[in-house]
Amino acid sequence: MQRATYLLIFAIISSIFPFSGKATAATSDQEFMVFYSNDVLGEIEPCG
Amino acid sequence: MGGLSKKGYQIKKLRDEHQLPHLTVDGGGLLFKDTNLLPSRVEQAQITAEGIVQAYNIMGYDAVGIARQDLANGLDFFKNIVEQSKFTWLSANIVSKLTGKPVFTPSISRRIGEINTAIIGLTDDRQPSAITPDANMTIEPWQNILPTLVHNLSRESDFIVLLSSLTLKQNIEIANKFPAINLIITSEPNNSAMKPRLENNTLLCSSAKQGKYFGWLQIKWGTSGKWEHASSELMVEKKNSLDRINWQLKRLEKNQTPKEDDRYQGFIKMAEEVSKEISMLEKMAELEKPQGKTLSTYKNQYFPMQISSPDHEEVLKIVHETKRKINLAGKASSQKADTSVNKNILPEDFAYVGWLKCSTCHANQAKGWQDSRHAGAYMTLVRKGQQFDRSCIACHVTGIETGAESFALALPPTLQQVGCETCHGPGKKHSGNPKEFNMASPNESICLRCHQQEHDDSFDFAQDLEKLRCTH
């Protein structure tokens, strides 16, 4: 009886939070931006 | 790098215009130029590093990779920098020798719109002992770190970014072994700006050296979690190549070149080969398209940090304040070199005599030189309040080598320019006995001590020598 209860709870939780291997597995295309830089080299302003 | 306030302005403008979720990252190599700091420059380099961090805080950076040169001033200073940073410094492979665990944050997660993103940092491990001899730290090869880390992160992330100071070759190897890593921002010092490169399921991006450009990616992340190769740079390149070949063919036809002509046949053959390659790429793209799911696309653009670009006001204030602090620190630490305090600060074998001495015999040349920008080189620093900036001074006076900038304040006024002896060598012996000791003719390597690309990208030895009127 107890085991069945646990299984039922697990089934309900799984249906709400399905485990897909990937976190969100978005259902539509997602647009976003990445700004990137590198190698500033510590010079905050050119000389003179 | 005078571009921090320009970069701040452009990033804010693009964010405001597009109103899209975003991530702002830096591959590393942010704080210092080299892995070893010259003792004479440590204090000013620290002030610069702190200024950069403040500017990055204002610009809203999310994460920065730790490159070896970021640790050049020791662990304690770097930990202090980490505390001052509102963004996260990342390195998964700098580990404690005692515990084997990462010393710094290995990765972070960010939610960008509906996307769960993980950002990892990797530090160049080519000279592991150079930065960590006494800190009980070591830099592990990426092969020891990435398999477990990527496996764990890929279970909870839709998009994985790697900030890497490894070599391009290593980054390509990583891209081919870990398709779960979707974007690598590289910061290898020897690698300048390159077009984004798609390797397997990883996009590799790098902006130009010295922060002269920043990159902006607009990404449409498809439900398949895979990049579309059909829109890749390679495909675009092949299509452009085919356009050029067809244009050549049309030109030959217009000129009524016979079709048996070798050039015509050569272009026909090239067009066939490139068409085959395009067709193959299209088939590959079709094959990799999962049923019912969309592939991901990107647009990349580089922004140059031009002087004419507007400034981010808050960042500009940080830049000005940092410059002021640098000059003050240089002035304070150079007091001992002041001639009024210590007249013997210059080395005993100091062999420079100054332009005025030269002019007694070479009046015409000296007059021509006085009209050149070399004659006013020191004053440009004074006008900008940078005459005590040790990273500047050696190239604006005569007789001061890099690393010996503390002598700069001891120089007499006739050496506070880029004078005759900068190009021709010290003149003490020659001025004492001109018949026995000749002066050297300037060569390109002398000019390149200062006119390096990072300071003067239009330098041309032959042309610029002509401009120096002292040669006439």
Image (tube, rainbow, N blue to C red):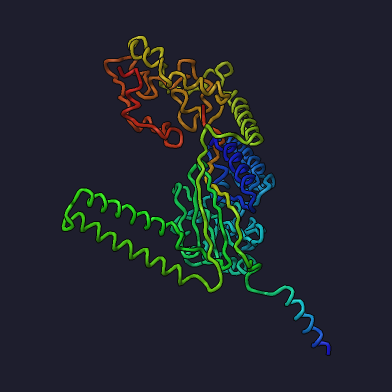
Q: Quadrant of residue B116?
A: bottom right
Judge whether B35 appears above or below B281 on screen. Answer: above
- Residue drawn 77% across the image and 84% down it: A7
| Residue B152 placement (x, y as % from top left) | 62, 68
Q: Could one spot residue B128 in this view of the protein?
A: no
- Image quarter hosting the C terminus of chain B: top left
- Residue drawn 61% across the image and 50% down it: B24
User: Outermost residue, right direction?
Assistant: A1
Judge whether B452 appears above or below B378 on screen. Answer: below
Q: Quadrant of residue B389?
A: top right
Judge whether B281 appears above or below B411 on screen. Answer: below
Q: Nearer the viewer, residue B348 or B118?
A: B118
Q: Nearer the viewer, residue B267 or B322?
A: B267
User: Outermost residue, bottom direction?
Assistant: A1
How many dots with numbers?
A: 0
| Residue B242 placement (x, y as % from top left) | 33, 56
Is residue B181 found left or right of B109 in the rendered image? Answer: left
Is residue B76 found left or right of B275 in the rendered image? Answer: right
Q: Nearer the viewer, residue B434 or B458?
A: B458
| Residue B429 placement (x, y as % from top left) | 34, 18
Judge whether B408 appears above or below B402 on screen. Answer: above
Is residue B202 found left or right of B366 in the rendered image? Answer: right
Q: Could one spot residue B38 in this view of the protein?
A: yes
Q: Nearer the viewer, residue A19 or B233?
A: B233
| Residue B21 placement (x, y as % from top left) | 64, 53
